[in-house]
Amino acid sequence: MEEPLAARGAILRAAIGIGLYAMAFGASFGAIAVASGLTLSQTMMLSLVMFTGASQFAFVGVVASAGSPFAAVPAALLLGVRNAFYGVPISEIVHPRGLARLWTAHFVIDETTAMAISQETPRARRFAFWITGLILLCLWQLGTLAGALVGRAVDPTAIGLDAAAPAVFLALLWPMLRRAEARWVALGGAAVALVLIPMAPPGIPVVAAAGVAVVGGLLPIRNPAEQIPDRNRT
Amino acid sequence: MSPLWMAIIFAAVGCYLLKLAGVSLPESILNHPKVQRVAQLLPIAMLSALVVVELFDGGGRYSLDWRTLAGVAAGVIALLLRRGFLVVFLIAISVTALLRLIG
């Protein structure tokens, strides 16, 4: 028997909080998708199979404005590239083997990555990844369905939800920023994105920030005591 | 099949394959200490970049809604006061909502 995970309740509550704001954005996505000319089943297909919000919004945005729907494919893919990068830390946390990679991959998105890396023990990281992924998958579908059927009932920005995502990611990064190295990497990533916003296509500013992590990770460790002690490694 | 359906399937399957590629590195590479160090720093750099994009990107040009920024700043103050995740989250959205309501 494993002993109970002390942080389980807090992780679950945080995952539900994230799921609820995602549901509101899912509703907004469903409404926009239908208004852009997608059918209900096309809209649900995007939320079920694509299951990565930024790519979905980009896809319907281009469909609504461009002549050919194929112009929307590269826009969605470009915003999906960052999930490939998140796969590396998620692999280090979840260690999916063989076929388990097939379903683990589906859950690799901003929110699950942020929730997983923010926890203190390997077990808590795995639990945070899965519970956030499952709750988000369910509530994202529910939100999309509601928005597609009802239309734009509530504007998420009117209830302040545009502040939710940046606040959530900052709060989840916060405990890691105690280390000087992590603070430099965070600042570097933020600076790269800020510079690239007006000149690079959507999706690239976040992916380019990965370069800062690669440089930071390959530099020699100045102070080995700064490495996170990996407690209860299982 | 309509062009729209084809585009949806290409884009959805493509996004899934990108995620799959990310979790497909062999254990021998993942066990390398330098890879583990980069893996630890990757989400820190990228999620910080994401925060910046969400606050300052208005579709390929800079734009800023001071009410969103004020809400997130209130959240940061809550973080400095060592408040928990849900408190930070609720403060950020309620400050933004309140400012939007009154101005």
Image: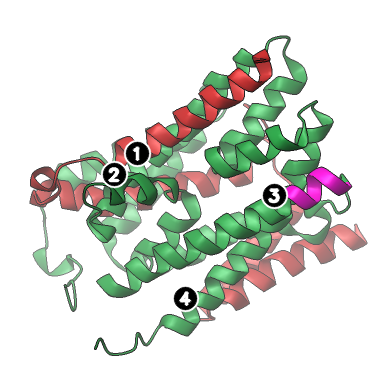
Q: Colour of chain A?
A: green
Q: What residue would you read off at disc 1?
A: B20
Q: What residue would you read off at disc 2?
A: B23
Question: Can the viewer see residue A32?
Answer: yes
Q: What residue type is disc 3 on?
A: Gly
Mark 2 touches mark 4? (CB < 8 Å): no
| Residue A51: assigned label | none
Please name the predominant secondary structure of the magenta segment in the image: helix
Q: Residue furthest top?
A: A67
> Which residues, given as a range, are shown in magenta?
A145-150
- The image quadrant of residue A57 is top right
For disc 1, the neighbor class at 10 Å (few under 14, some 14 to 19, many from 20) is many
Pointers 2 and 1 within a single chain: yes
Q: Element type at marker 2? A: loop
Q: Element type at marker 4? A: helix
Q: What residue would you read off at disc 4?
A: A11
Q: Which chain hosts label 3?
A: A
Mark 2 touches mark 1? (CB < 8 Å): yes
Mark 4 touches mark 3? (CB < 8 Å): no
Q: Nearer the viewer, mark 1 or mark 4?
A: 1
Query: As rendered, which of A12 and B90 lies closer to the eye?
Result: A12
Q: Which chain hosts label 4?
A: A
